[in-house]
Amino acid sequence: NGYDENFAKVTLSNRPDLCEYQCNGAMAAAKTYKKKPIDIANGVVEQLKDSEVFEEVNAVMPGFINLKLDPAFLSGYMNGMKGAKKLGMDEVEKPETIVIDYGGANVAKPLHVGHLRSAVIGEALKRMGRFVGHKVIGDVHLGDWGLQMGLIIEELKDRKPELPYFDESFTGEYPEEAPFTISELEEIYPTASGKSKEDAAYKEAAMQATYELQHGRRGYQALLSHILNVSVTDLKRNYENLNVSFDLWKGESDAQPYIPDMVQKMKDDGFAYISDGALVVDVKEDTDTKEIPPCMILKSDGASLYNTTDLATIVWRMKDYHPDELIYVVDKRQELYFTQVFRCARKTGLVKPETGLKFLGFGTMNGKDGKPFKTREGGVMRLQYLLESVNEEMLKKITENQKAKENLEISEEEAKETAKMIALAAIKYGDLSNQASKDYIFDIDRFTSFEGNTGPYILYTIVRIKSILNKYHSMGKDESGAVIEAAHSASEKNLMLALSGFGAMMENAYEETAPHKICSYIYELANAFNSFYHETKIMSEENEQIQKSYIRLLELTKSVLETCIDLLGFKAPERM
Ligand code: ARG
């Protein structure tokens, strides 16, 4: 019709009782083209009348266009999706290299619930990025370079002064075996940290040890690698339990070799200057509405800081991986800090002007009282305890479920494995279904429920599909080669419509770094499936062709749901 295509935006209908899609562009176009909206709408409708895509196209006063898809077109699309790579989603045209910095575990300290969000959200983003076609590298960025290292060294020195690590004249090979186990290490750190709060001299000594470690004292470097080895082994196991994995296990300490040159260059280029003894770079901008303090590069004693390692980390990431974008999944309370770091990196030329630097700050996970999640005793909740308690809760639920069903005997071992899988889904979905930047309440009763917008409900839906498919095949039937027919009912069409939204949803969810959009999508898809399931006699359908078509549609539904939960980082059991 010669109208600008920007007016042709079609959205999902907000009156699903009247139509499936709608276009409201005629109202806006009316002004531009000086015509009545309804005339424009009628013109468009006239043109679409013979299209095979739509079953019904109507213009409604004052100028809405209501659209209903043709069932045969829709089922054709379903068949196409089934055969297509990535379920028909278009991969990005220009794949980018992206480094995602998430996890952020601190060496020698147990993971606590604060690290859960970073791991869960970062892992989902990494998988989403790969799915849409990018090259994504996940880096855990361990906290292995601060005072906590000095504290551990100091405490070890107090306990075992005879070890060669503390003898400055020692020039031989240090032992291969670490002088502590993981459980000792986990006890040493809190003890040392407690002492340093009471004893100023002790703290001073720990700071001195940190300084010497950072300035290359041999024995301390050797201790650091023991601490790292022992701790990383343990961390890997913990992350594995969360179905989270990293391509790189780099830490703050790995940035160390890049610091001297980086600092020198910042000085030479005239960006870094001494203020109150410390070396800083100004990062404020004229348009700032609030005060952005300078980025501190070195403390007055020359020691490097969290900033310094983050900046030097950017240096090696650029050098080794040439990323187009760096994404940080960190607690939103570090937002100002990252504003400083990003501005400093840009200003001093550590990144290219076109390199993306994105901070994805997440909110706090709160308890039911609305305060940061704590143990019953009020301490920081260790991640392991949290997982264990949700596992237990889940095991109780599925055991009860099995009893209620009576018929199905699941072995204790399978029950435990299944409980773990559902528990992980409960935790991850409970987290990811919220917009990342918002605080949320960790409600174990709600998260583990089999009903409502929860991980277990999604798994339950997948398991239901699996069991229908199993039953069908165990009857010796075979649907291969059959096609999905045009919908036989409204609920079936509705399920197809939900499935057809997958590609657009995925592109948008990644674009907006929003895993919660995948959650809302699969919740609606699961609802659409369950309505279809309740209204349709699948197993007793007598027309074999129709039954095959149903089975094919179920398989597609299962693929879409499984693809989505895989991107969210969890899996469905065989039965539950
Ligand atoms: N280790 C830090 C913490 O526990 C998080 C690290 C975040 N990443 C970064 N590049 N600074 O708070």
Image (cartoon, grey):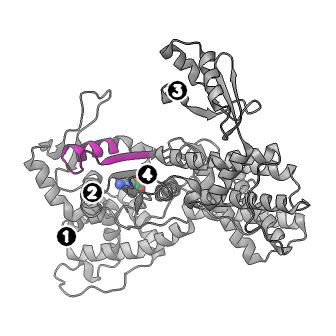
In the rendered image, residue 136, in percent from the top left (x then y), is placed at 41, 60
At numbered mark 2, what does the secondary structure look like: helix, strand or loop?
helix
Which residue position is annotated with label 4? Answer: 329
| Quarter assignment of residue 448 | bottom right
In the rendered image, residue 185, in percent from the top left (x then y), is placed at 43, 72
Residue type indicated by callout 2: Thr
| Quarter assignment of residue 478 | bottom right
Earlier residue among tags 2 and 3: 3
Q: Nearer the viewer, mark 2 or mark 1?
A: 2
At numbered mark 3, what does the secondary structure look like: helix, strand or loop?
helix
Earlier residue among tags 2 and 1: 1
Residue 485 seen by the camera: yes
Residue type indicated by callout 4: Val
Q: Nearer the viewer, residue 288 or 379?
A: 288
Determine whether label 1 and label 3 are within 8 Å by CB.
Answer: no
| Quarter assignment of residue 108 | bottom left
Which residue position is annotated with label 1? Answer: 216
Q: Nearer the viewer, residue 524 or 236?
A: 524
Span shown in magenta: 337-360
